[in-house]
Image (cartoon, rainbow, N blue to C red):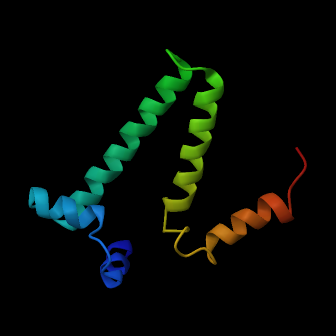
Amino acid sequence: MRLQFEQQRKHIPSAVECYMKEYGVTEGQVCQELNKQVEDAWKDINQACLMPRGCSVNVLTRLLNLCRVIDVYYEDEDCFTHAPTKLMDYVASVLVNPFEI
């Protein structure tokens, strides 16, 4: 669904389109490969946080939190482009209706 939306916008090719053209594979194969790359990146991030080398834990924590936010934005749909959907619910749950810990 995201690919069709990106194609309608016609401003730049999406990562899926570029990958399909470069490697001559189907949309489904591209999605599998990109999901694998995301999974591998999370493994690298987790390993770096568990065994920090050459970088302070404070910097790693901030980078991990940024990755978490990006994951929330793009996990199921493009919440950044379509902000009135899930993203507004997330913002409201954190800032408007916070819960006690």
The residue at the far front in this view is 11
Q: Residue 10 appears at what percent x and percent y?
A: 30, 81
Q: Is residue 83 above or below residue 31?
A: below
Which quadrant, please, contains the C terminus?
A: top right
Q: Residue 53 appears at what percent x and percent y?
A: 49, 15
The residue at the far left in this view is 24
* Res. 9 visible in picture: yes
Which quadrant, please, contains the N terminus?
A: bottom left
Q: Is residue 33 above or below residue 40?
A: below
The residue at the far bottom in this view is 8
Q: Is residue 85 left or right of residue 6?
A: right
**Residue at (31, 52) in percent of width and height:** 34
**Residue at (30, 67) in percent of width and height:** 14
**Residue at (59, 51) in percent of width and height:** 69
Q: Quadrant of residue 60?
A: top right
Q: Quadrant of residue 57?
A: top right
Q: Nearer the viewer, residue 59 or 5?
A: 59
Q: Nearer the viewer, residue 21 or 86?
A: 21
Q: Is residue 100 above or below residue 29?
A: above
**Residue at (35, 51) in percent of width and height:** 35
Q: Is residue 43 left or right of residue 7?
A: right
Q: Residue 44 appears at what percent x and percent y?
A: 42, 30
* Res. 25 visible in picture: no
Q: Is residue 92 above or below residue 50?
A: below
Q: Residue 7 appears at what percent x and percent y?
A: 30, 79
Query: Exactly how many numbered labels are in the figure?
Result: 0
